Amino acid sequence: MENQYLELIQKIISTGEKRETRNSITYSIFGEKLEFDISKSIPFITTKKLAWKTVIKELLWFLSGSTDNTKLLEQNVNIWKDNASQEFMNLLGFKDREVNDLGPIYGHQWRHFNAEYKNHKTDYTNQGIDQIKYVLNLLKNDPMSRRIILSAWNPCQISQMNLPPCHILAQFYVRNAKELSCIIYQRSADVGLGLPFNIASYAVLTYILAKLSNLTPKKLIVTIGDAHIYENHIDALKEQCTRKPFNFPILNINPNKEYNNVDDFLIDDFSIENYQYHDIIKMNMIA
C-alpha cells in the first residue's frame, strides 16, 4: 500500500507545476486520493523512519483541545516550534501574542469549535462545540448518520490562527454495525514531510474512536487538494522512491485499560509490532 505514496511523489516530480508560494517554490498537482486498509496494520511509512510517537503525541495534544506549544516541547516534540516563535508571529502581526500560543488551531476547533479565543492558557471548558464528543455520540447512537463529521476549518477564526489547518475535514462511516472507516480532506499536503504524518495521525484517530465505540478500524481514505513537494525536498524524495517498502506494522492499544473518553489515552498506551523501516532521510520543515 505504500507504493501509492511513492507513485504520488513520482507523479508530482514529473508532472507538477512549478509555483512560487507563500513560503517556498513547490511542484504541485491538484486532486489526489490515497486509500489504506487499516483493519490489520497501520500505515506508518517504511521507506524512511516515521517518528510515530511524535505523531501520536501531537494527536493526543489535538484531542486535549490544547493550543499551547509548550505542552509539545515538554515531550520533545518540535514540529510546531517555528510556527510558535516570536519572529513568525511578528510576521503575522500577532505582536501581543505570547510565544508558543498558536491561536485557535486544530485542538480548539475539535473540542471548542468557534468559542471566543483569548489565549492558550484560557480554560474553554463547556465553551464552543465539542466536535469529538459529537462524533462519538453519533458513532454510538446513530452510526448510519451521514453527519459524522469533524471540521477544523472555521472561517470565523482563520485570521487568528498561526497556521490555518491543512487537514480540514474528516468524515466517519460505520459498515455492518462493526467497521469504522474515515475519509479526510486536505486542502494542502506537504507530500515529503507532512503527508506521512497526516496519514498516520488519522489512522490512529480512527483506532481511538473505534476503541471508544466498540468498532473495528477498516479503511482510511486521504483526499488531497493541493499536493505539493518543496523544491529543496526533491533530491531526498527521489532517493526515497528507490527504496522497497516493507509491510506496514501493527498498532496495539493497551487491552488491560478501560477507556471512557479520548482524554484517557496516553502515549504509553500505544505500541507497535513488526515495524521495519529504511534509514531516516533528512528534509527541512518549512514553516
Image (spheres, rainbow, N blue to C red):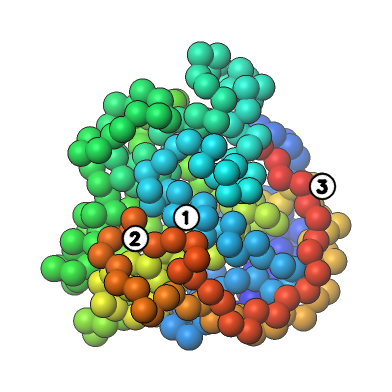
Marks 1 and 3 sit apart, C-alpha to C-alpha, by 27 Å
Dot 1 or dot 3, earlier in sequence: 1
Question: Are there few (<14), some (14-19), or many (20+) residues within 10 Å of tag 2?
Answer: few
User: Farthest front residue?
Assistant: 256
Identify the residue at horizontal 81%, vertical 55% (top origin).
282
Asked if the residue at tag 3 contacts the one at tag 1, i.e. Cβ–Cβ closer than 8 Å, the answer is no
Among the two numbered marks 3 and 2 on one chain, the one whose residue lies closer to the N terminus: 3
Q: Which residue is mark 2?
A: 264
From the viewer's perspective, is 209 left or right of 60?
Answer: left
Q: Residue furthest left?
A: 141
Q: Along the line of sight, which residue is nearer the eye, 261 or 287?
A: 261
Q: Residue at x 74, y 68 (%)?
A: 48
The crowd level at tag 3 (other Cα within 10 Å; few <14, some 14-19, many 20+) is: some
**Front label number (1 vs 3):** 1
- Amino acid type, label 2: Asp
x and y percentages locating residue 170 in the rendered image = 38, 58
- Residue 249 versus residue 194 in the image, above or below: below
Above or below: residue 10 compared with residue 179: above
Estimate the spatial distance between the alpha carbons at disc 2 and disc 1, rounded to whole Å. Answer: 13 Å
- Drawn side of residue 207 relative to residue 89, left or right: left
Circles 3 and 2 in contact, beta carbons < 8 Å: no
Above or below: residue 171 compared with residue 218: above
Disc on the earlier residue, 2 or 1: 1
**Label 1, residues with CA under 10 Å away: few <14, some 14-19, many ≥20:** many
Q: Quadrant of residue 122?
A: top left
Q: Which residue has dot 3 on it?
A: 232
Mark-to-mark CA distance, 3 and 2: 40 Å
- Is label 3 or label 2 in front? 2
Q: Which residue in the structure is indicated by mark 1?
A: 59
Residue type at numbered disc 1: Leu
Closer to us: 171 or 132: 132
